[in-house]
């Protein structure tokens, strides 16, 4: 069937057969990594939008980060990295401190961000510097004010 003479009937080729037959315009099949990356990017974009809706003062900083790092003027950053840096900056500006929770469930309370990197965050935890990498950090939350 696949090797028969062409007809006007649709033969329902799969992707690979269509590419081998010379059909152009298809992009390659998506890898699991690229699908996972796109899902995480979409989630990060939604979270950035939600942060800006809750705190409109962040809008200018978000626009600056996107202009500098998502458009090619500087090193390219994904939406996930932009969200991470934004949360780190919010934690650094917090007057009530912040809590970082790792993927293993451990939490680290701190009042001081020592330095923000694109792949991690250096904080002062229990009087000592502690480096937390972006892939380990599950969440960064500003502590609520004590009433």
Image: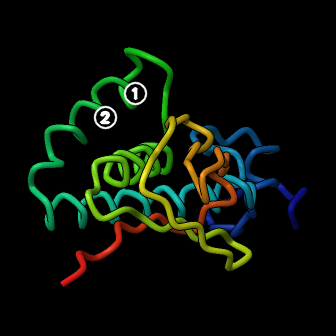
Q: State yes or no: discs 2 and 1 in contact (Cβ < 8 Å).
A: yes
Write the residue at 31% across / 34% down: 66
Instruction: In the rendered view, tell whether residue 52 sits above or below residue 28.
Output: below
| Res. 141 image quadrant | bottom left
Residue at 46 percent of width and 45 percent of height: 113
Q: Residues within 10 Å of mark 2 (few under 14, many from 20)?
A: some
- How many numbered marks are there? 2
Query: What element does badge 1 sit on?
Result: helix
Question: At 23% across and 75% down in the image, what residue appears?
Answer: 145
Q: Secondary structure at mark 2?
A: helix
The answer to whether 111 is drawn above or below residue 12 in the figure is above
- Left or right: where 9 falls relative to 144: right
**Relative to residue 91, is residue 23 drawn left or right?**
right
- Categorize mark 1 by other alpha carbons within 10 Å: few (<14), some (14-19), many (20+): some
Give the percent coordinates (x, y) of residue 119: 62, 40
Instruction: Report the Cα–Cα distance between label 2 and label 1.
Output: 5 Å
Residue 128: x and y, percent? 65, 48
Identified at 73% across, 55% down, the residue is 33
Farthest residue in the top direction?
Answer: 73
Above-or-below relation of 31 to 21: below
Pick whichever, 103 or 46, lies toward us. Answer: 103
Query: Mark 2 = which residue?
Result: 66
Left or right, 82 with respect to 3, comes to left
The residue at which mark 1 appears reads as 69
Who is closer to the viewer here, 34 or 137? Answer: 137
Colouring? rainbow
Q: Which labelled disc corresponds to residue 111?
A: none
In the rendering, at what x and y percent does residue 49 appear? 24, 60
Which x, y percent locates residue 104? 74, 75
7 and 16: which is toward the camera: 16
């Amino acid at each position: 069937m696949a090797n028969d003479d062409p007809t006007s009937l649709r033969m329902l080729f799969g992707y690979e057969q269509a590419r081998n037959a010379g059909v152009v315009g298809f992009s390659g099949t998506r890898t699991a990594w690229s699908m996972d990356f796109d899902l995480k990017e979409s989630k990060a974009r939604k979270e950035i939008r939600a942060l800006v809706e809750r705190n409109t003062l962040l809008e200018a900083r978000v626009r600056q980060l996107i202009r500098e790092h998502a458009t090619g003027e500087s090193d390219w950053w994904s939406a996930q990295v932009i969200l991470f840096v934004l949360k780190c900056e919010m934690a650094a500006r917090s007057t009530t401190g912040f809590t970082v929770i790792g993927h293993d469930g451990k939490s680290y309370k701190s009042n001081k961000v020592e330095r923000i990197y694109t792949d991690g965050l250096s904080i002062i935890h229990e009087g000592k510097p502690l480096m937390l990498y972006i892939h380990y950090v599950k969440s960064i939350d500003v502590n609520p004010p004590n009433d």
